[in-house]
Amino acid sequence: MTNAARLSKFLIATLCSSVSIFNTQLKLHVAASSDQTPTLNEPFQTELKSLPHAPCVSLFHRNGRIGCGTVGRDEMTGTLLHWTTLTSDNYYSSAMAQISPFVAVLDEFEYTSDVIDQISSFSSDDGTALVQGILILNSTSSASYLNAAPVSPKGQNTPSYQLTPGYDYEWNANGDGLMLKDMYGIPSGFLGDEEIATYILQVSKDQSSLVLASASKSSSNNDGSSGGGGFFTSKSMSMPPVVAEFNMYMGPQNIDTASCLSWMDNDDIWRPKCLPLGGNSVWATAGSPYQSTNNDNNNGNNDDGGDGKTPIIMVATNLDSTSMFHDRVPGANTAAANILTVLMAAKLIGSSLPDDELDGLNKKIMFAFFQGEQYGYLGSRSFLRDVAYPGFECDDGRTVAAVAKKKDEGDVTMACLSPLRHDLAFADLGDIESMIAVDQIGILSDENTFYVHDSGAGDGLSDIFTGITLDDWNVVDGSAESIPPTPLSSLYKLSGGTVGGVVLSGYDATFAANAYYLSHMDSNYTTPID
């Protein structure tokens, strides 16, 4: 039985008792020098060839930008050099003093904030940046790993810190914070193909060794020359150098969300250059369709406050994940496991209990899957603001039938033209009294153990969960004096702490060490999820 299946049974037992992305084309090329005779097999020939990769892109927020990109619209090109080989040699300083612009090749475990700081510090005598870009490879491994997320996810030193209760709590002990860096001028791409990555690794090591050998010769000459007419010449290399060219323009340097979305072209036409973050969230209720105008699906024991709306208990999770490379986000533990758990709970409840029994409960069960949670809780905050905090109001005269051809039918779903809402069914929901959020349950910190983190306003949910056992599995109270960053954070924050709940997770005081939180390595292939 999977962790998702086990946790969905716990849920059943309990229940029944915006930032912007720059819109651009990204290309990466690797080639031999175009003025030499080809010596390599496809795809590496004299002309530049497109190389499959996952780019590091730029994101914008109200205070600036984070992520990668080229300086201006011109390509950035350099010879491939293996960073560790280059920097671990005694002649490293001498080499850096004479070297031409290059592209640094890193193992994925070396792509850290400290290394980026070191790379960024190097420039030629005229101030030109020596590093023209970074290629990150998946071809090697390491016993240690720092993920690119901050130690306090959506917390301290992030654009979302004001939205997160206990924003300074360090849930992510392996966090490096790289994804919060502004790496303008350092285009970067991840090479996922193992065969290509292995080739690039060897070539970059070989070329680094040639650079160091030339630096050593220069040092022995004591005249500051390379002794062979400079690096990467026909005299110093047995084959043409392999170079990378980055075409990854992500907008000008000094730009934020407001300026990007209000962009005016030279012809004074408004043409925003960003793609707003967001997406579609999904919610549904168990039992008969929700009706606020009558109580046919409510029993007389519910506490509806006199408005006919049965109060809600939510089971919620995130739909999305992220990483440094937005085209490579498996999200196995940070998203997929959560989604599967809530879906299985919904399926088991719906198939095990008839609608009349579900309608007879004193609270309505809602299942919710929120999009954009990794970027300031976009989905959950938008939904909760519409439902209750402060509640959605359609402009006068702007309410219409959601489906025009059904406008004359008696019971028709309504929509709003301004502000645009495709469906106003959420307006019929009752008060949300508590939430059960599910987070990272695919990989457990401690064998056979789930943890429950109580917000302190959870309507006794924590005691219910910790009182349940299933076979050799159990749920215990979390030891952290905070709640993890989940949709529950939105409910607790927007309600001013008056409405809360619990977070069910696979970790206690910190995220599981081997879970690769918000990483391109958060996959079932890297760490199999039971």
Image (spheres, rainbow, N blue to C red):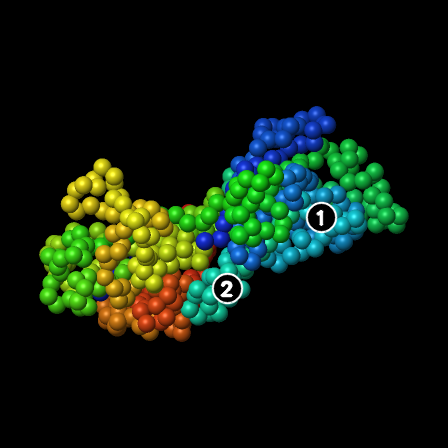
Residue 474 visible within the image: no
Q: Position of residue 436 (x, y in %)?
A: 29, 63
Residue at the image position 83 percent from the left and 43 percent from the top = 226
Q: What is the quadrant of residue 70 in the picture?
A: top right
Q: Position of residue 323 (x, y in %)?
A: 48, 51
Q: Position of residue 430 (x, y in %)?
A: 23, 61
Q: Is residue 483 or residue 242 the one in the foreground? A: 483
Q: Left or right: where does residue 128 sit relative to residue 291? A: right
Q: Position of residue 96 (x, y in %)?
A: 75, 50
Residue at the image position 27 percent from the left and 60 percent from the top = 314
Q: CA distance from mark 1 to mark 2?
A: 30 Å
Q: What is the quadrant of residue 88 in the picture?
A: bottom right
- Secondary element at tag 2: loop
- Secondary element at tag 1: loop
Q: Left or right: where does residue 83 sit relative to residue 359? A: right
Residue at the image position 63 percent from the left and 31 percent from the top = 48
**What is the crowding at mark 2: few (fewer than 14 residues within 10 Å), some, or many (at least 20)?**
many
- Give the mark nearest the N terminus, 1 or 2: 1
Task: Give amino acid for label 1.
Answer: Ala
| Mark identifier at residue 151 | 2
| Mark identifier at residue 445 | none
Q: Is residue 52 or residue 109 the one in the foreground? A: 52
Residue at the image position 11 percent from the left and 57 percent from the top = 296
- Image quarter where the N terminus lies is bottom left
- Residue located beneath label 1 in the image: 129
Task: Give amino acid for label 2.
Answer: Val
Q: Are marks 1 and 2 in contact (CB under 8 Å)?
A: no
Point out the residue furthest to the top here.
37
Q: Is residue 434 above or below residue 19?
A: below
How many numbered circles does the render carry? 2
